[in-house]
Image (cartoon, grey):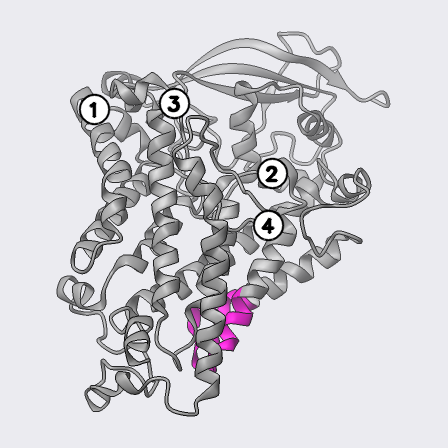
Amino acid sequence: MSWFTDWFAATDSEVARWMLQRGVAALFFVAFLSSLNQFPALVGEHGLLPVPEYLAGFHRLRRPSLFRFRYSDRLFRWVCAVGLVVAGLLVVGVPQMGPWWVPLVAFLVLWALYMSIVNVGQTFYGFGWEMLLLEAGFTVAFLGSDQVPPPRPVLILLVWLVFRLEFGAGMIKIRGGAEWRNLTALYYHHETQPMPGPLSRQFHLLPKWMHRSEVVGNHVAQLVVPFFLFFPQPVGSVAAAVVVVTQLWLVLSGNFAWLNWSAIILAFAAMGDSALHAVLPFVPADLSSASWNAASPENTGRMTAWPASGDWSAWVWVAVVLAASLLLLVLSWWPAKNLVSRQQLMNASFNRWQLVNTYGAFGSVTKNRVEIVVEGTLDTVPAEDAEWREYRFRGKPGEPERIPRQWAPYHLRLDWLMWFLPLRTVHEEWFYTFLMKLLNADPAMLRLLREDPFDGERPRWIRARSALYEFSSHAEFRETHQRWVVTPLRVLIRPIGLKDR
């Protein structure tokens, strides 16, 4: 069996495991923190789409959730508190110091708790990076602790996850809008993406030949490079480095919650310690205190004796890893089939546990940025010449002179849903409820905004209109010092008010 244990134990992946476990745990921490701050106002007991009403509409909630039979904001906050504590412990490496089953249980707890939130979060949790975090958390759970070597089957499955994430995104673009095929997609993307960042305008103003080069680089990174992730070292590490660099480019150019950071962290699954030490000599050669670690000089050559004769715990660990790997391998059939399908699905799950999903983003690019502007007035008559004051959002563009902020990996869910409204319709249930909350100056809802123009006072009327937002050119900025050129379009929801006003 020595040949099997030699293959099973990925002795050159200690840094990879260190990064994967702590990185995924850090993303869980951000996800729970984001939910704690926003979930009650959005879908809590008195939210825009209340969870109790959502659950009451189903005789049986098919997707698993701890809130299936009972939901309260207090119970939700306890779930988030537990998630934050467990994620924090994993980030600092406390569970990893114990037996192999301790980090396994810790990550499965994070997976179960966050899945409970996602499965009742409705449209506010309908993003691809939610299922990506769930799948990553479940898979990373089987990387074990410092007491066992990093298991190669799990690392291969994590590389398979990166492959689906990158290649799926590449294929959805090739099959999507013509702008990806004629290399013009980035003429528009930096300006029209859901939530621009501080540097998005600078990216948008790059010469068009650079935008075309960006698209070519994107196609290479997503359609060619992912295959090399499976190659032996150092090719796998080089391919992973390309993934990291391209994802960092996306981090600099926009705000996509933890999507890009997930890809960066998961790419370490394809990196070998020797390659990392060659490029980053400051990375410690020995990140583990375990006796098995071959990186320590006193332990050189001992890996051939792992697991030791009679070490039943290690063999149980091997059996658990193989069982989980077999499960994920079987579940891989459906997303693999989807990748080669002409009717490729984007960000879809094929099972109720949201494991081994299919991913993709921006199959087509919006050509114009239309923003929904929400305004209120204290005037008795809501005429056009009334004093209309605009509500300011944290991440959504507002004032023409304001620099967009960097929020990722933190996720502003309300702002993202506001971006989708012009692409769909403003006549969505949650948006009308949102307007009613503003009419009532609801404190929980106002805390999600950056600025309440009425300082807690209830407006008499409220309306929603549309406006075209375009990045200003260098010449326009020098003249006006405004980063956006804003063109009002039309009123979409005429003034509405409360009967008691």
Mark closer to the observer (1, 4): 1
Task: Describe the element under mark 1 as helix, strand or loop.
Answer: helix
Residue 35 is labelled as 4
Query: Which class describes the residues within 10 Å of circle 4: few (<14), some (14-19), or many (20+)?
Result: many
388 in relation to 307, above or below = above
Q: CA distance from mark 2 to mark 4?
A: 10 Å
Q: CA distance from mark 1 to mark 3?
A: 17 Å
Query: Which class describes the residues within 10 Å of circle 2: few (<14), some (14-19), or many (20+)?
Result: many
Residue 104 within the segment the image draws in magenta: yes
The residue under label 2 is 124
Side of 7 relative to 326 (left or right):
left
Q: Nearer the viewer, residue 338 or 212?
A: 338
* Residue extending farthest front: 1
Q: Position of residue 146 (x, y in %)?
A: 38, 79
Tell me which residue sits at (85%, 20%) in the image.
499
The residue under label 3 is 176
Q: Position of residue 355 (x, y in %)?
A: 52, 51
| CB under 8 Å between discs 1 and 4 | no
Q: CA distance from mark 1 to mark 2?
A: 33 Å
Task: Describe the element under mark 2 as helix, strand or loop.
Answer: helix
Task: Describe the element under mark 3 as helix, strand or loop.
Answer: loop
> Which of disc 2 and disc 1 is earlier in sequence?
2
Query: Which class describes the residues within 10 Å of circle 3: few (<14), some (14-19), or many (20+)?
Result: some
Residue 264 within the segment the image draws in magenta: no
Identify the image quadrant of residue 23: bottom left
In the image, what residue type sits under mark 4? Ser
> Which of disc 2 and disc 3 is earlier in sequence?
2
